[in-house]
Image (cartoon, rainbow, N blue to C red):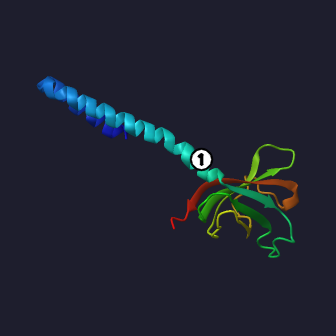
Amino acid sequence: MALAAAVAILLVGLLFLFNRRAAYPALGLVAIIGITVAIATALQPSTRQNTREAVTAKVSVDPANCSDPSKPIAIEFLNVNQAAVQRVSFSLLGRVKGHSSVAYRGFLRDDTIIEPGQAALTCHGLLPLGFAPPRPATITLEDYDWSVDISLVDFSTR
């Protein structure tokens, strides 16, 4: 983006040196294109953020939800968007209760299709290298406050 702007400024500058009459319309065209791109770029993150916030997640450590001992953490995703979710990329964060620093971080992805207005419960295990050093000798899941930070949501285009 910056390279394209630099090239446009350079070309308009050179045009001013050689032919001022043609440079003014070129300057106007470059200004219109630049303003259009700037407005579109400024609006895009808020749109992306709103669609990402349309999918929420809750974490629980409940053996009733996840019977597999290798995948003890239950994450429930709720899709309140108008489109079905195809894939969610997220970070599973664990903080020792009473502390603010992150003791566990696992980058995970789930490809369960979630229809609009529906929820999906998935079970995940802990990644062996997800704990910050020094890794605890024994891991008791109830000693941590678990949360999910959703980083990317892919919606279906049907």
**What x and y, as percent, mark residue 42?**
48, 38
Residue position marked by numbered label 1 in the rendering: 49
**What x and y, as percent, mark residue 135?**
77, 57
Q: What residue is shown at x 87% (from left), y 72% (from top)?
A: 64
Q: Nearer the viewer, residue 4 or 40?
A: 40
Q: How many marks?
A: 1
Q: Which three-letter amino acid code belongs to the residue tagged 1?
A: Gln
**What x and y, as percent, mark residue 148?**
72, 55
Q: Nearer the viewer, residue 41 or 59?
A: 41
Q: What residue is shown at x 42% (from left), y 36% (from top)?
A: 38
- Tell me: 145 left or right of 132: right
The answer to whether one can see residue 124 in this image is: no
Q: What residue is shown at x 59% (from left), y 56% (from top)?
A: 152
- Tell me: 3 left or right of 116: left
Q: Say which element carries label 1.
A: helix
- Tell me: 13 left or right of 137: left
**What x and y, as percent, mark residue 22?**
15, 29
Give above or below for 13 relative to 70: above
The answer to whether one can see residue 123 in this image is: yes
Quadrant in which residue 142 is drawn: bottom right
Quadrant in which residue 90 is drawn: bottom right
Image quadrant holding the N terminus, namely: top left
Quadrant in which residue 9 is drawn: top left
Mark 1 Cα-neighbour bin, 10 Å: few <14, some 14–19, many ≥20: few
Q: What residue is shown at x 44% (from left), y 37% (from top)?
A: 39
